[in-house]
Image (cartoon, helix red, strand yellow):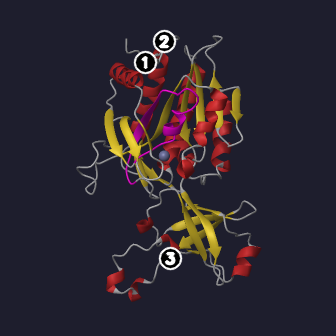
Amino acid sequence: MRKILRDLCTLPGLSGCEESVGRYLYQNFTRYSSSVKTDTAGNIIARFASGTEGAKKVMIFAHMDQLGFVVRKTEPDGFLRIERLGGIPEKILPGMEVLVRNDRGRWMNGVIGNKSHHVTPAADKYQVIPIQELYVDLGLTSAEEAEEKGIWPGCPVVYKPRFEELSGTRCYGTAMDNRGGCAVLLDLAERFAAAACDLDVYLVATVQEEFNLRGGLLSCASVEPDFAIAIDVAITGDTPDMAGTLPAALDKGPVVSMYNFHGRGTLNGTIPHPLLVSMAGEAAGELQIPIQRTASCGILTDASYVQLWHKGVPVIDLGFPCRYTHTAVELCSLTDLKELSCLVERMVRNAPADICFERHYG
Ligand SMILES: [Zn+2]
C-alpha cells in the first residue's frame, strides 16, 4: 500500500482534470476485474460479481480528485492570478510550490509569491493574504509569453505533488485526501478479486468531490446500488492546536462518521443508516480492530449526494484519520488505511445475500 500511496499522491488530479489519477486507477483495476467502466463524468466503476443473478449491489467509493486552483488572469508582466477550487486555506499559500498545466497538457513548475521578508512591515507579518492578492510565478516575463506557453484562464493549478515517509507507518503528502481512499479501493480490488462474496461489489473512484460533491452521484445511475460505503479522510484532533476539538487520532483505527453537516452553501450532510453502523461495529469486533466515532459540523463528503439518488441509498462515511487536511502536508498512517480496508471487506462479506435496509415502525 505504501508504493500505491506514493504513486497516487505524486499524480496531479485537480477536480475536473482527473486524467492522470484516473489512468493509474483504471489500469490497476483492470488487473483485478474484467469489468471496469467509466461514465461521461469520468467516474471509474470496477465490478466484482458474486456469480448470482440479481444479487444485491454495494458501491464502495472514494473520490480521486484533489483541491487546488485555476488560473483566473495573467498580468501584463506574466504573473498569474488564481482562483480557489475547493476549500483551500489561504494562510498556507505564500511561498508554496505549485504545478500549472498548460493547454497542451504539460505541467509546469511555479511558486506562489510572497513579499520578501526583509521589507515586510511588522503589521503585515501576521496577516493572511487573500487569494485575490496572491499570484503564481512561472518565471514568465509577459502575458504574451504566457499565451505562447499555453497558459490561459481556467488552466489547473495544484500543490506540487509529493509523498514522504515519517516515523513508523506515518507518512504525509499532497492529496492524501483522498488518494488514501483510492489506495484502499485498490487494496479492496485485490481482496474481492481473490474471493467473491454474496453481493455484487462495485468499487468506484469518483470525480469532482472537492468541486461540488456531486460527481459520485452520477455513478449511481451506472451501478444502481442497494447501499454504499464512502471512504475518505477523517479529521483528527490529536495535535496541539486541535486538542479538545475532535476525538479521532492517528493509529487508533478507522473512523465512523455518526453525523456530518455543512451549513454553508450546500446545506447537506450524512446521518449513516443504522444498519451500516452496526455492521461496522460487528466487523470491527470480529477483526479486533479499534474504531473511532466522530460527529461534526463543517464537514461533508460526496456520500451526502449519493444518499439522495433515486429512492435513496443507505450510506455510511468511513474514514482514515488524517491531520492537516487541505494543506500540502496531509498526514496519515498506513496502519489505519490497512485496517480500514480490512473493516470494509469484512462488513461486505458479512452482509447476507438478502440484506434489507427498509425501515419498519410497526
Ligand atoms: Zn475528501
Marks 3 and 2, the one that precedes in the sequence? 3
| Sequence order check, earlier mark of 1 and 3 | 3
Q: Residue at x 74, y 63 (%)?
A: 103
Q: Which of these two is toward me, 123 or 340?
A: 123
Quadrant housing the C terminus: top left
Q: Which residues are magenta?
A: 299-324
* Separation (CA) of disc 3 from disc 2: 56 Å
- Label 1: few (<14), some or many (≥20) within 10 Å? few
Asked if the magenta segment contains residue 128, the reply would be no
Q: Secondary structure beneath disc 3?
A: helix
Query: For the residues carrying marks 1 and 3, which lies nearer the camera in this image?
Result: 1
Q: Is residue 318 magenta?
A: yes
Element at label 1: loop
Residue hosting label 3: 133
The amino acid beneath tag 3 is Glu
Mark carried by residue 359: 1
Number of other residues with Cα within 10 Å of mark 3, as a class: few under 14, some 14 to 19, many 20 or more:
few
Please tell me whether mark 2 sits on a helix, a strand or a loop. Answer: loop
Mark 2 highlights which residue?
352
